[in-house]
Amino acid sequence: MAEDEETATARYIASNVSTQLMLKTMFEIIATMADDPDGYRSDMRAQLLDIAGTMPLAPMAAARERKVRAFVKETVGNLLINQRPN
């Protein structure tokens, strides 16, 4: 049975959010093992943002490619924010 559009959209968003949470957890675990956790996060963020701007993508319209790259950069930026624990 096919899902309705609302359910399919919710499933898609939940999948993306859960993936981001797992990645954030992994980065934080690795960062805590580094001599300089903030430096690690900053370096990793810069490297990932660079890759996001140059990584080959499937063929698509230029406008869509710009949007995809912008959303990838936004996600990477949100995953690797230097924050001091409270």
Image (cartoon, grey):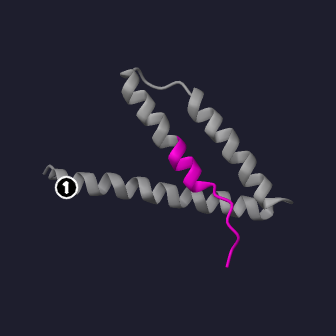
Residue 47 is left or right of residue 13, and the answer is right
Q: Residue at x 57, y 48 (%)?
A: 76
Quadrant of the drawing holding the C terminus: bottom right
Q: Quadrant of residue 81?
A: bottom right
Is residue 82 inside the magenta stretch? Answer: yes
Residue 9 is left or right of residue 45, and the answer is left
Q: Position of residue 22 (x, y in %)?
A: 54, 59
Residue 25 is left or right of residue 71, and the answer is right
The kind of residue on which mark 1 rests is Glu
Please determine whether, in this image, residue 57 is positioned above or below residue 67. above
Q: Residue at x 62, y 39 (%)?
A: 49
Residue 10 is left or right of residue 43, and the answer is left
Residue highlighted by disc 1 = 6
Please determine whether, in this image, residue 10 is positioned above or below residue 52. below
Please determine whether, in this image, residue 23 is positioned above or below residue 44. below
Give the tally of numbered discs.
1
**Magenta segment range?**
73-86
Please determine whether, in this image, residue 72 is positioned above or below residue 56. below
Residue 5 or residue 68, whichever sits in front:
68
Q: Residue at x 14, y 52 (%)?
A: 4
Regarding mark 1 in the picture, which secondary structure is present there? Answer: helix
Q: Residue at x 30, y 56 (%)?
A: 11
Q: Quadrant of residue 67?
A: top left
Q: Position of residue 64 (x, y in %)?
A: 37, 29
